[in-house]
Amino acid sequence: MKELTPQIIAEITGGQYVGAEIDRNRPISGAVRDSHDVGPGNLFVCIRGARVDGHIFANNAFDSGASCCLAEQRIPNAKGPYVIVSSTLEAILAVAGYHRSLFNIPIIGITGSVGKTSAKEIIAAVLGIKLCVLKTEMNMNNELGAALTLLSLNAQHEAAVIEMGISKFGDMSILAEMVRPDIFVMTKIGYAHIEELGDLQGVLRAKTEAFAYMKPDGVAVLNGDDELLLKYDPKMRKITFGQGKHNDVRAINIKTDGIDSINFDIISDSGKFHATLLAYGSHLATLALAAVIIGQLLGLTDDEICTGLTAYAPVDGRSNVICVNDITIIDDCYNASPNSVEAALESLSKLPGRHVAILGDMLNQGELSTQRHCEIGAFAAKSGIDYLICLGTQARHIYESYVCVREARSMGISGKTAVKGMRSDEEEIAYFSSDMTELVKELPHKIKKGDTVLVKASRDMHFEGIVHFLSAKSENDYQ
């Protein structure tokens, strides 16, 4: 396989090589954007951020063993070779696309408004039973993240699972042109990035841009329980998954054992077999079906697939369960949309203990933001959530709607009542704050021993701070 070198990078990008002649053909393996992550042989990509300019760390990268830097300007007293380009972001996408073209292995792309990270982790766990798998790490699902992931491909890898996140039209085309997936998984079309994409049809159009960059023998693996995806024709082989009988691969008899496991039966062309996920959240059973399909496509037996499913472990911020100080914390704070919040509330309602939900703003909901937040409040009330805590400008609507529905139901009436956060019998049922510091200060007075607590909001609400606070408090701090 042809190795990347500074000379090849200059040719791919049309950039200017700067450095000693002897260094033109230095081998390059992997790429990073953070100088703290540099390893021997890496390409360091100098990115101009809003607060920090990566160019100032170029020599730090060379000190850590970088083979080359990709830059937009000359590097004073450079300790190694570099390539100057007009845009390091555009250049690294081109380099990643070239590097991907050197590999004849199955590349699985994953997108969806809900569940793409969990699906990615489950698919990687299943394939990892038999194959050496590269997967997207952490939240690196944008253009730069996907490029850096692809540049981690090496001769040992036998498959790659690439998460592909978008926020506007055109993003998926850029990603797909670089990734060129052989199999493309779509988990759900939901109300994410509606502010940019307009409506569910817009979300569908934006995400399905990927199919224009796939080969005719590619495979579309779509959630057939989603009406839009069920009807969508990708112009290639389509395999559907879900719980409905119309799906090619489906899950039945889904049963949860508290926070410990999900047990279900899988029906596919190979027959019926039982599977277990050692995780929380019944919605994961549906996502696991995508892994079943891909495992079967790549030659895994049903037994190997089942073993892979049990190897799946949730990642922080996505239905990760933390049991500490006699409370159970459902850390699902990585991101939030109406669909994912409803799924999280439904799963919470099936767990033991008092059900407490700490919810924040769902961002990028556009003109229907107020309505979507009100709907979540009503859903929480009807789902049996015992106590609600809200933080954020839009989350106030969740709080108000929740209280109205709870009060109306307690009095046996319909319609709106005064928002007090108290039922007629003076039992507090909800709490709202617009200030994180104030909310955190109140948490020990709101959370009780034995509670099961869901923490969920959009990423920019930084609810991981709430999870850390709850995890760090001593048992005596709770009622």
Image (cartoon, rainbow, N blue to C red):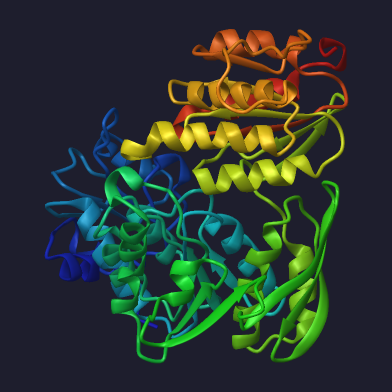
Q: Position of residue 25 (x, y in %)?
A: 27, 69
Residue at the (66%, 65%) spot, across then down:
286
Is residue 362 something that shows in the picture? no
35 left or right of 95 in image? right
Residue at the (28%, 47%) spot, across then down:
196
Q: Position of residue 245 (x, y in %)?
A: 67, 78
236 left or right of 409 in image? left
Q: Position of residue 145 (x, y in %)?
A: 40, 54
Residue 422 image-quadrant placement: top right
Of 185 and 57, which appears nearest the observer? 185
Residue at the (44%, 68%) spot, across then down:
228
Q: Is residue 245 above or below residue 40?
A: below
Is residue 50 something that shows in the picture? yes
163 left or right of 170 in image? right
Q: Quadrant of the N terminus?
A: bottom left
Q: Is residue 357 above or below residue 344?
A: above
Residue 351 image-quadrant placement: top right
Residue at the (54%, 48%) spot, across then down:
339
Of 17 and 249, which appears nearest the observer? 249
Q: Is residue 414 above or below residue 257?
A: above
